[in-house]
Amino acid sequence: MLNCSLRSVTLGAVAAALLAWGAQAGPIVPVSSLPPPDSATFASGQDEDYRIGAYDTLDISVFQVDLLSRTVQVDGTGHIQFPMIGDMLVAGRTTRQVADELAGKLDQNYVRSPQVTVVVKDSASQKFTVEGAVKSSGVFPLQGHMTLLRAIAVAQGVDGETAKQKDVVIFRTVDRQRVAGLVDLGAVGKGKIDDPPIFAGDVIVVPTSASRRFFKDLIAATPILFFLHP
């Protein structure tokens, strides 16, 4: 009787977690069938079509002009300050577009035929979310090539006592619709299945096993219960 009750509670907890995050999501599919978002949504700072956003950090290099090469941060209005040019709008543009504009402005008065390179060092406008049975849930910046295992590591790992690793869900917006992919985190960790990529805007939910949580809370409360009922 106890086993049946615990099983129903566990399934209910998983369902509640999925409903909380995916009330508007379509059917849950294996993560291998989960499509990537639109290119404009998931482009990372290293992609050519990535659009620079507020608070991104840029590495700007001017070939053979070290005094002009520097690291700058985009301010909240989407602008940067650059020597000899001053205030310049960069938000919403690609790194190539910014490099071309910088080269054009420098070529007008200061540097002859400058070779300018712009690289996104830190893409602050690109983030993902990890929730559920992890040690440090929250919203995190997407840096470099992110995968599920790396995302979980950023959240300081799963809660080994309560996490239901077999039913991890990745929520994603594709074509303006919310879709969800189911993945066995344990199998990924053992190399049995591929480590799925994580894109900007993804929400990773590690469900809690209600039965494990029940026993953990019961053990934690035992000294108090004993004190109240000797």
Image: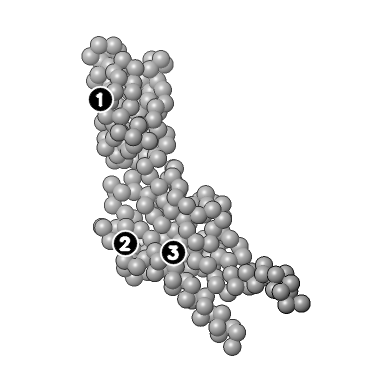
Identify which residue is drawn at 31% across, 49% down: 41
N-terminal label among 3 and 1: 1
How many numbered tags mark residues here? 3
Secondary structure beneath disc 2? Answer: strand
Disc 2 target residue? 178
Is mark 1 in CB contact (under 8 Å) with mark 2? Answer: no
Residue type at the position of mark 2: Arg
Marks 3 and 2, Cα distance to the nearest angstrom?
12 Å
Measured in 3D between alpha carbons, the distance from the residue under mark 1 to the one under mark 2, in whole angstroms, is: 37 Å
Residue lying furthest bottom: 1
- Mark 3 or mark 2: whose residue is earlier in sequence: 3
Numbered circle sitting on residue 101:
1
| Image mark for residue 39 | none
- The earlier-in-sequence mark between 1 and 2 is 1
Which kind of residue does numbered mark 3 sit on?
Answer: Val
Residue at 39% over, 64% down = 21
Report the residue that reaches farthest toward the front.
Answer: 228
Whether tag 3 and tag 2 are in contact, CB under 8 A, the answer is: no
- The residue carrying mark 3 is 169
Image point (32%, 38%), residue name: 53
Q: How is the image coloured?
A: one colour
Task: Look at the image and tell me in which quarter the C terminus lies.
Answer: bottom right
Q: Could you give the CA–CA distance between mark 3 and mark 1, rounded to whole angstroms? A: 43 Å
* Three-letter amino acid code of the residue under disc 1: Glu
**Can residue 177 be seen here?**
yes
Does 9 sit left or right of 179 as displayed? right
Q: Assign a secondary structure to mark 3.
A: strand
